[in-house]
Amino acid sequence: MILSALDALYDRLNEDASYLLPRPGHSRQKVTFKVVLTPGGELFEIQDLRRQVGRSMRPLQLEVPGETKPSGTGINPGFLWDNSRYLLGYEPTPDASGRPRTCFEAFRDRHLALEPDIESEAFSAVCRFLRGWDPGRCADHPVLEEATATGFGVFQIQATSGYLHEDDAVQRWWAEHGVPDGSDAEAQCLVTGSVAPIARLHGKIRGVVGAQGAGATIVGFNEDAYLSYGKEQSFNAPVSEEAAFRYVAALNALLDGPRREKHALRVGQATIAFWTERPTATEDIFAAYASGIQPAGDGSPQDENVRQKLEMFLRALREGRSAYRDLEPDPEETGFYLLGLSPNAARISIRSFHRGSVAELLDNLRSHHQAIAIERRWVQEPEFPSIWSLVRQAAREGKDVPPTLEGPLLTSVVSGASYPHHLYAAVLRRILADRSVGYLRACVIKGYLNRNRKENVSMSLDTERIDPAYRLGRLFAALEKTQADALGGNLNTTIRDSFYGAASATPRSVFPRLMRTYQHHLAKLEGGRKVNREKLVQGIVEPLRDFPAHLDLAGQGLFAIGYYHQRQAFYTKKEGPEKGAREQEESKA
């Protein structure tokens, strides 16, 4: 199913020149330097081809003859492109084994052997360079130290615009003789259903975070235990050479191509590829939405186009199916795909795969945001929190977030399944440690209670809800507010600092004491404030027959929501200068 979807995607991407899909027998590689030669075959200079993008240097992606180079210690020279060891005999890091010179000699010998067959003056110039080049001269070119650390190099003849592997005579020869002959093994392809030569090895997938830089495979067999019926390597899962090329090219275009920003996103240790059956606004904006990126708009036509699509996307999430067709003309019939990949040694593991219609995706995203939606404390807080911002609440610092949280949460969001219990439990632990229930933490708790526990928690304060845990959370907020109003700025430690953990887990052990302290604080209030506070506390306590001895995890979540709702009700009612001061006080909490 996965390979079939990627095979079908190849045709769509191949029609769009911006994806730069390679032709059969070719691959796209990250090129960081070029060796410029004179027409006579002398070295003119070695140039760095990387470009400055933000704070990093990006390689140039070029289509070159041949497939991605396999990893390993074998000698495997490319054709008119390769790394610095093969092109020049240069090793970026000190190497006393002599391997760089061995690689260069293999590269040289391969090209010299082909010179009689390739009628090209440019190719002959490369051969003359290779005959006379001494790897010891690499030290005279300091550009190699930085430009060759990663990536590959190509050749160019001085005063020409193209690269040597793009020469017409070279391309004609490669098309006739350079592409390896098809496999002798023929079988029915699992992807297309046609009988065709079967690929012995599949190409490498690049762009998966944590995988090998040169790429890794998603289909392969390297142990006898995985073989059957005497078939070796990928013949165990027969995929035709054409289909193998197509699915690899399509997936590399999503993860490592020029349009990867809109197709690939990182979720924990997984890399997610997202696409739709046909070009859609949802495809254009989903990665930005999932990553929490919201373009501010700089006035450029491209940025304005992105902003408009994002606005339509968010409006669809707010209004539902009545607004879907403003975003997509046929959301029920347009399919979407979400493929989760993670590194596994020299291979790539499939973490998840989801498919459905764009309408189903929007339905599930809308259901997610309805589940987590809660009254915001400040207008600056995101109406649609990103996946990362939610899982970030499970740890004190971003680097401490467990890598197993983001993937399951994303799966829950796009599929409409239950939220991961361990995210909910981790957020409750952070609340106990920090004694703080902020907006995003409240979102996680409300979403879990609504979807997993069917609690039907409201967005804002629900004065009719009589659950003891919810009432106790409200009561704790009211007692804390009374203490703050009575003592003002003379507080070093609030009741929240001292008692939140015990109050939310073992109410009976602390609330009688807090109620006695509350009476002292209430006595310090005057006039209408005292009367209103007393009425509020009495209204909260009235349905409670007793303080529970213990609250389970669901009860602790309701306690946190009741506490958040009541605090929010206190501070949203304030107007004027006092409101701003209170909000600043709350932002520190």
Image (spheres, rainbow, N blue to C red):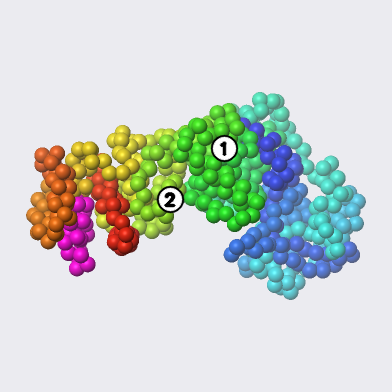
Please tell me which residue is depicted at 83% across the width and 58% down the height of the picture. Answer: 161
Inspect the image, locate mark 1, and give the three-letter code of the amino acid beneath it: Leu
Instruction: Tell me, for residue 373, which label it has, or none.
Output: none
Residue placed under numbered mark 2 in the picture: 382
Residue 245 rendering spot, x and y as whole percentages: 68, 39
Please tell me which residue is depicted at 13% across the width and 59% down the height of the picture. Answer: 526
Please tell me which residue is depicted at 19% across the width and 60% down the height of the picture. Answer: 485
Depth check, front residue: 324 or 398: 324
Q: Is residue 408 visible?
A: no
Q: Residues within 10 Å of mark 1 (few under 14, many from 20)?
A: many
Q: Which residues are magenta?
A: 476-500
Q: Quadrant of the N terminus?
A: top right
Residue 239 rendering spot, x and y as whole percentages: 65, 32
- Name the quadrant containing residue 147: bottom right
Q: Residue at the far bottom: name it.
A: 140
Residue 431 rendering spot, x and y as whole percentages: 28, 53
- State the SS at label 1: helix
Image: 17 above or below 39: above
Depth check, front residue: 304 or 250: 304
- State the SS at label 2: loop
Q: Quadrant of the C terminus?
A: bottom left
Please tell me which residue is depicted at 73% across the width and 44% down the height of the picture. Answer: 17
Q: Residues within 10 Å of mark 2 (few under 14, many from 20)?
A: few
Residue placed under numbered mark 1 in the picture: 327
The mark that comes first in sequence, 1 or 2, is 1
